[in-house]
Image (tube, grey):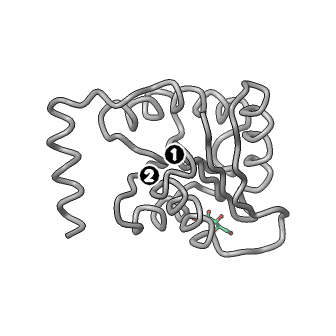
Amino acid sequence: MKIGLGADHGGFRLKEDVKKHLLKLGHQVVDYGTDSTDSVDYPDYSEKVAKAVLAEEVERGILVCGTGIGIAIAANKVQGIRCATVSDVFSAKMCRQHNNCQIMALGERTVGPGLALELVDAFLAAEFEGERHERRVSKIMQLEK
Ligand code: RB5
């Protein structure tokens, strides 16, 4: 799978761990930055990854900031994007199965690297279940109009 990664300074280290993990599993990775722990603004990275997903440059996105909150809020402002902040494996799976999220957000300061990689695996393995969830996700997308 081709996966887009983005992080601010608060998520840089975890993004690097996620990148190594994905490459080891044989995925393709497009890294939209940031590339150090120097202070940056997380909405810039949300925008890059969200637009790459919509342009189908990548199939899924993973965003990381300190908490996974700000970077997810910003991604969800890009029309057509569904991004969830997750810190448990069940939610990482359900945000795909029920909510059809294209992007998952992680917090480097809230989730340890071991759990984070399990969250990534769960997110990438799960598929949207459609049916009644299709109607509900369509209603979410209608709210953008
Ligand atoms: C940056 O200090 C921090 O605010 C950011 O990484 C994130 O946690 C915001 O939601």
Residue at point 23%, 46% (across, down): 137
Disc 2 marks a residue whose amino acid type is Cys
Figure quadrant of residue 7: bottom right
Residue at numbered disc 1: 104
Figure quadrant of residue 40: bottom right
Residue at point 48%, 34% (across, down): 92
| Residue 88 in the image: above or below residue 57 | above
Kindly report the distance in space between the C-alpha atoms of the residues bearing marks 1 and 2: 5 Å
Q: Tag 1: Cα neighbours inside 10 Å, few (<14), some, or many (≥20)? A: many
* Residue 83: assigned label: 2
Task: Name the quarter where the N terminus is drawn.
Answer: top right
Disc 1 marks a residue whose amino acid type is Met
Percent across and percent down for residue 34 are 76, 64
Percent across and percent down for residue 57 are 56, 52
Residue at point 65%, 31% (across, down): 115
| Camera-nearest residue between 64 and 51 | 51
95 sits left or right of 47 in the view:
left
Q: Are marks 1 and 2 in contact (CB under 8 Å)?
A: yes
Task: Name the quarter where the C terminus is drawn.
Answer: bottom left
Q: Earlier in the sequence, mark 1 or mark 2?
A: 2
